[in-house]
Image (cartoon, grey):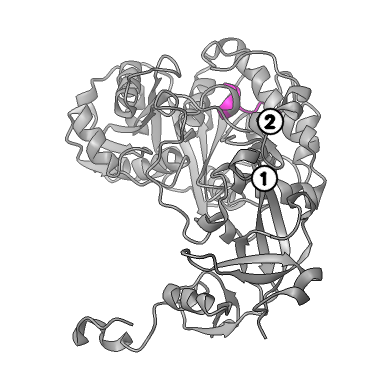
Amino acid sequence: MKKIKERQTSASSDAVAPESYFRQQLAEDKFVIQRCERTGRAVFYPRAISPFGGGALHWERASGRGEIYSVSVVRRRPERGGDYNVVLVDLEEGARLMSTVVDVDSADVHIGMAVQARIEHPEGCDSRLVFVPATQANQIKGESA
Amino acid sequence: MTTHTVRGSSAIVGVGTTPGWNSPGFSALDQLGIAVRAAADDAGIEVDDIDGLFTATLSQFMPALSVAEYLGIHPKYMDGTNIGGSSFLAHLLSATVALNAGLCKVACICYGSNQLSAGGKLATLTEPSLWELPYKPRNPITGYALATARHMHQYGTTREDLANVAVSARRWAQLNPEAYERAPLTVENVLESRMVSDPLSVLDCCLVTDGGGALILVKADAAKDYPQKPAYVLGVGMETTHRQVSQMADMTVSGAKVSGQRAYAMAQVSPQDIDVLQLYDAFTINTILFLEDLGFCLKGEGGAFVSSGAIAPGGTLPVNTNGGGLSCNHPGMYGVFALIEAVRQIRGNCGDRQVAGVDLALAHGNGGQLASEVTAILGSEATL
């Protein structure tokens, strides 16, 4: 972390900003989420305080396992890349996030489908969390332990 | 139950809109200004009588300042809160509180947009949703599509049910000479229209139009000094459930459930007392969700209820009598127009689309992607 002036970072000088930490971990092929210390509930997206009462959060490695809560196929002309799916995934830990299911025909993505996280590292872009059908999970590069 | 101090304490004495919904060359503030002029004329006041300003737009970062400057007024109280298309229903509550506190005497709630003539794009200052952007949802439709898919999965709601929402709205629009789309529409037309974000097709989506709308609000005890039949504010309730749609806990239950309960409690009425409903129908799923969440049918039965013909002209429950956002007009944010139609139905001057004997009207606004819900209940003098 870049140090600016001692007094400007003071109490939290050794803490990494939540979004930065998430993205750093993702770039290192690790999918992490937060958990609320008071309620034990999983939290996504990364924050500085818990949305369940404002208490402390800690980081943990996510299982990467989840289930499709809802799906929509966004229609796009073939010359612009064709149709793609946007999904909401309920993680096994309890939090929900938006993502997309890759390596599958979008028309086959359905509510209730078991999925597994995969981290893409496109050249020149930020690493991106996507999902694949759980049946393909054993082929995943970078699957979390 | 004790009577809430807000109930019946303010009244809408003026409403106005732009004369049409496609006005090339007229800016968002021009269209807002034309609506304010019309509302002031309706109330029998001058624009500079307005001393309380309540506004939100999609095009002004500091809307109250831009609107006050445009109108040439120096309001004693202003509120530019933007919680999406429901803002204007929420403004009804803050304006009532400000009037009751003596902070202003003549409040104006107003909106304008050139969304159609500016190029058909949803011109908006909104920030990208940080955690959703990488997956390219087509906003706002994909958020509503995700809610629709979930409702279909849990309750067996069909695309035909959704199409019946659009067809019912169109049939009302055919009774409204001010509606933008009045051509005949069938369920088959909707089902065959181009899919945009499954399961919503282009005819499941609201219109993209220009337009402005405005309301003039005063304390109830002053309402009879104005020429129009007053529409009293009986109850307003609001609720927010998220900002990014991925944070919405249960996509089949909107914040309308809680906003409705709050509004009913303040107004001391029940769903069965309501004579006419104006529901913000940005997409066909909205009408189904709000009918369920506001207590007009059971959860999961909204689709069948709509397909029975209940909300179309001649049905048992008049909904969106102007044609709604699906067929009357939708200049980016629609909430103010739901309120205006509720007022007109209470006044009883809606012509062919007038519902007989309206004393209680419910207007419901939606903001973001089902993110903020505001329910307002208006009544005639008989309801005080």
On the image, which quarter does residue B109 sit in?
A: top left
Amino acid bearing label 1: Asp
Main secondary-structure element of the magenta-colored stretch: loop
Callout 2: few (<14), some (14-19), or many (20+) C-alpha neighbours within 10 Å? some
Image x and y of residue A30, in percent: 57, 80
Q: Which stretch did the figure color magenta?
A: B316-325
> SS at mark 1?
loop
Inspect this view and state whether residue B310 appears.
no
Q: Nearer the viewer, residue B188 or B48?
A: B188
Q: Name the front one of labels 2 and 1.
A: 1
On the image, which quarter does residue A61 sit in?
A: bottom right
Q: Is residue B237 left or right of residue B62?
A: right
Number of marks in picture: 2
State whether residue A125 is above or below residue B373: below
Residues beneath discs 2 and 1 located on the same chain: no
On the image, which quarter does residue B79 sit in?
A: top left
Q: Which residue is mark 1?
A: A83
> SS at mark 2?
loop
Image x and y of residue A9, in percent: 26, 83
